[in-house]
Amino acid sequence: MEKRGSITQVEIFGQTYNVRAEGDSTYIHDLARLVDSRMKEVAERTATVDTTKIAILAALNITDDLYQAEKRRTGEPADFRVRAERLIRKLDDALGA
C-alpha cells in the first residue's frame, strides 16, 4: 500500500499550490517561504516578468547555496592539498629552509 502523505496549501510568488508530502506541514511552509523569498529577490534584480524564468533563476540560486554549503561541509581534497602545499612553502620561507 502506497503512502500518499497529507496536503499542505502554500503560496509561492502569488500562486497557491497544494503540496502532497509526508511529514510536518510547517517544514513545507518553510520551504515555500524560502522559494517565495528567492523568487521575489530574483524578480527585483531582473527585468523579466516571466514567472517561469524567475522560478528557474531562483532554483539555480537555491541550488548554488546548497552546492556551496555541501562543498564547505565536505571540502574538496584538491583544495586542501593546494592550501597545504602553499602553507608548507610559507613555512619553509619563514624558517629559511
Image: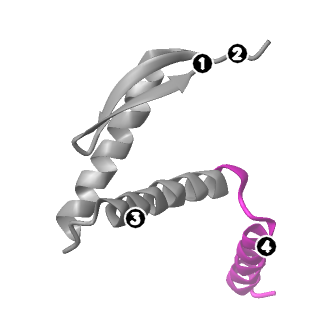
- Measure the C-alpha gap from mark 3 to mark 1: 27 Å
Q: Residue at x 71, y 58 (%)?
A: 75
Q: Residue at x 46, y 56 (%)?
A: 59
**Sequence order check, earlier mark of 3 and 4:** 3
User: What numbered label is drawn on residue 57?
Assistant: 3
Q: The residue tagged with tag 4: helix, strand or loop?
A: helix
- Measure the C-alpha gap from mark 4 to mark 2: 43 Å
Q: Nearer the viewer, residue 71 or 31?
A: 31
Residue 14 location (% of width, % of height): 21, 42
> Residue type at mark 4?
Ala
Magenta stretch in the rendered image: 73-97
Name the residue tied to disc 4.
78
Q: The residue tagged with tag 2: helix, strand or loop?
A: loop
Q: The residue tagged with tag 1: helix, strand or loop?
A: loop
- Looking at this rendering, what residue extends furthest in the front direction? 1
Name the residue tied to disc 1.
22
- Measure the C-alpha gap from mark 3 to mark 4: 29 Å
Cβ atoms at labels 3 and 1 below 8 Å apart: no
Q: Nearer the viewer, residue 93 or 9?
A: 9
Cβ atoms at labels 3 and 2 below 8 Å apart: no
* Quarter containing the C terminus: bottom right
